[in-house]
Amino acid sequence: MDAYLFIDFGSTFTKLTLVDIEKEEVIATEKSYTTVETDVTIGYENALKKLNQKVSGDYNIVKKLACSSAAGGLKIIAIGLVPELTAEAAKRAALGAGAKVIKTYSFKLNSSELEEIKNSNADIILLAGGTDGGNCDTIIHNAKMIEKFSISIPVVVAGNKSSNDEIKEIFGEKVEYYITENVMPNLNHINVDPARETIRNIFMKKIVHAKGMENVEKSISGILMPTPAAVLKAAEALSMGSRDEEGIGDLAVIDIGGATTDVHSIAEGAPSKPGVVLRGLEEPFAKRTVEGDLGMRYSAMSVFEAAGIKKMKKYLKYDDLDIEAEFKNRYTNTSYVADDEKEIDFDEAMAKVCADISMKRHAGVVEAIYSPMGMMYAQEGKDLMELPYILGTGGVIVNSKNPKEILQAAVFTMEDPTSLKPRRPKFLLDKNYILSAMGLLTTIDPNMAVRMLKKYIVEI
């Protein structure tokens, strides 16, 4: 039989998904610890060996495609003009490309900030600033500073188009740069797709080699994108469908990992109630947020700080645990696997905290404002209150006996009345852990990807 093999080089595990092309079925999945400290080929071959033991009969792999978040994934520094406008638009473009934004800068950069950038471990700088025809001074100043400090990090220029010619002269042959469309061509209007695509192309050409994956690349068709970008593509396909296949409509994905919790929403997010006015930067239809302080292992102590003992006790079934000690154990032993009822309950309480806080940060808020016309309501961010679906993925959700309970922590409650979290969503589960694989499949057969997503994403 002919098959596709999809590979996800994760920060903790390398996951394989083997798909029967004719039957449009998952033949088998397997995972192995990602050996990023030595050679990722070892982890990949270990997983492939275990996969082959599961498969009966011969198969012919037509294509092998991969995504990666190993070694910390794709790390970007976003630079803009005003923090709430072009800097925020640059950040959203980077997040939509599947990156982790490690730092955001605004206004004219100074020498100490350039030293920070030079000494950072960023893979790409996204340089924005000014609407088209607007302020040129800041982005040109920042380009000059990047050249002056001999920054060797690739720069994606996505700012005021009137500054592009001068930036080309400033960078010349000294700075590796890529010019794309402005992330905010008009005030409060964002245009993130061209920058996202430019970032993805750089990732395909360069970042993969920086992660020591040259040996793996020789045996596969290509590492196409960061893992979060693959998950977002799958979410878009399931929501909106393809040319020939219907999608299921608006949805949000909560992906809880060892280091971060990602939330993707595929929805317009317009006010669901009359009399509400929009305020702030336009929201992208396909939006991704990353909470770097909400993770099950590498960020465990940050979860403790974000939640506190009171919120953890809200979700814990047992009250005889040393909560801080449990968090410290997971932070210091990142490969720890909970194996008894109390420990599993603690992990799931952590996951509920991650779902709760990450959705609160992702969704918009509404607040009362006073105007000459009397009291009105202003919405900032997306209104997700009528969102029909929340889809859960990530190890702690997929492997849980109570995935619905974890996802229910993300819904609206009167404890936080200004939040625009979903109120009555149905809950879906990525039971076979195939979202990233289906995101890769959209690049070669989007119709098949939609059909398989609708087959394998189950309601819980």
Image: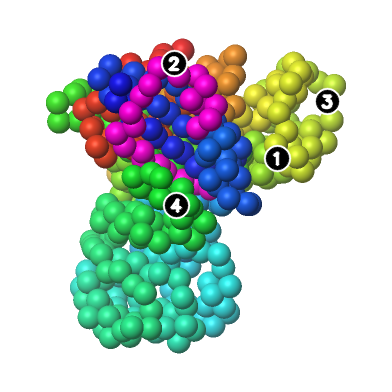
Stretch in magenta: 48-70
Indicate the secondary structure of the residue bearing disc 4.
loop
Q: Report whether 291 appears left or right of 127.
A: right
Q: Report whether 396 appears left or right of 168.
A: right
- The amino acid on which the numbered mark 4 sits, given as a three-letter code, is Ala
Judging by the rendered image, the residue that carries numbered circle 4 is 99
Q: Nearer the viewer, mark 4 or mark 3?
A: 4
Judging by the rendered image, the residue that carries numbered circle 1 is 334
Q: CA distance from mark 3 to mark 2?
A: 46 Å
4 and 2 marks in contact (CB < 8 Å): no
1 and 4 marks in contact (CB < 8 Å): no
- The amino acid on which the numbered mark 1 sits, given as a three-letter code, is Thr
- The amino acid on which the numbered mark 2 sits, given as a three-letter code, is Ser
Indicate the secondary structure of the residue bearing disc 1.
loop
Indicate the secondary structure of the residue bearing disc 2.
loop
- The image's mark for residue 267 is none
Judging by the rendered image, the residue that carries numbered circle 3 is 321
Residue 262 x %, y %: 49, 39
Magenta run includes residue 61: yes
Judging by the rendered image, the residue that carries numbered circle 2 is 56
Mark sitting earlier along the chain (4/2): 2
Residue 267 x %, y %: 31, 34
Residue at image location 27% in from the left, 69% down from the top: 179
- Residue 243 visible within the image: yes
